[in-house]
Image (spheres, helix red, strand yellow):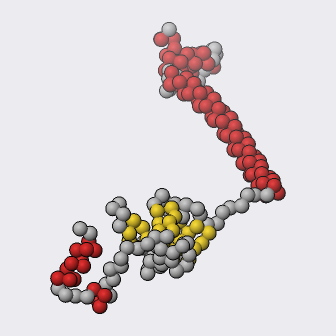
Amino acid sequence: MKLKDQLLGIFQKFGIDPNAHGVKFESEVKLEAEARLADGNMIYTSADVFGVGSDCYMKDADGNVFPVGAGEYPLEDGKILTVGEDGKITEVEEMEVESEMSSDDIIATINSLSQKISDLQSALDSKNAELSAVSEELATAKTEATVSATELAALKKAPAAPSVKEKKATLSASAPAKAWGQMTYEERIMSQIQNIKK
């Protein structure tokens, strides 16, 4: 038993006239025209064509007809039906279709894209030149770092202070070969110390 029949039975049981309360149980809706929506569902109308003022319906899985809700319904053929709150079509629009570009427009677009490509190429060349300069600076810095590391290794191997033995050799080499009487007191003492160590 359909829902409509159940509701009519309830109204009759209590002796209520549904039409008096604004409830209308229409008999079978005669659908005259149909169209496929862009999403693949079917839409129907009782009018000959889908036009302003025509009512719109859909069917559920059981084939029961129900009015569509308010909103826009794009059709498969490119039209857009706008349905109002009352379930009637308020507007029928044609979808805007982009026209093909003229040859002048295509040439202008190609020239514009070519200019953008050449701008990008020159920017790329500039960045490559900067990268090359930075690479050269990096190579120079690496070379300097290698030289500094070599110098540091040499400094690490060298003694921190001159050897006492080297100072003695320097003193003995620099001692003048003067006669004893011509030497100062300090020179005589140094001469005596050197003779003792030999």
Q: Closer to the camera, 78 or 118?
A: 78
Give percent across and percent down for residue 164: 49, 20
Q: Compared with residue 80, is residue 76 higher up or lower down, i.e. above or below? A: above
Give percent across and percent down for residue 187: 57, 21
View extreme (right): residue: 104
**Residue 71 seen anywhere in this rendered image of the structure:** no
Query: How many marks are shown on the rendered structure?
Result: 0
Looking at the image, residue 88 sits to the left or right of residue 102; the answer is left
View extreme (bottom): residue: 20
Q: Residue at x 48, y 11 (%)?
A: 197
Give percent across and percent down for residue 161: 50, 26
Looking at the image, residue 173 sits to the left or right of residue 107; the answer is left
In the picture, the quarter occupied by the N terminus is bottom left
Q: Compared with residue 86, is residue 150 higher up or lower down, i.e. above or below? A: above
View extreme (top): residue: 198
Q: Residue at x 33, y 83 (%)?
A: 24
Looking at the image, residue 120 sits to the left or right of residue 45; the answer is right
Q: Residue at x 17, y 85 (%)?
A: 14
Q: Closer to the camera, 113 or 13?
A: 13
Q: Residue at x 36, y 79 (%)?
A: 26
Q: Closer to the camera, 140 or 179?
A: 140
Give percent across and percent down for residue 44: 47, 68
**Residue 111 seen anywhere in this rendered image of the structure:** yes
Residue 19, image quadrant:
bottom left
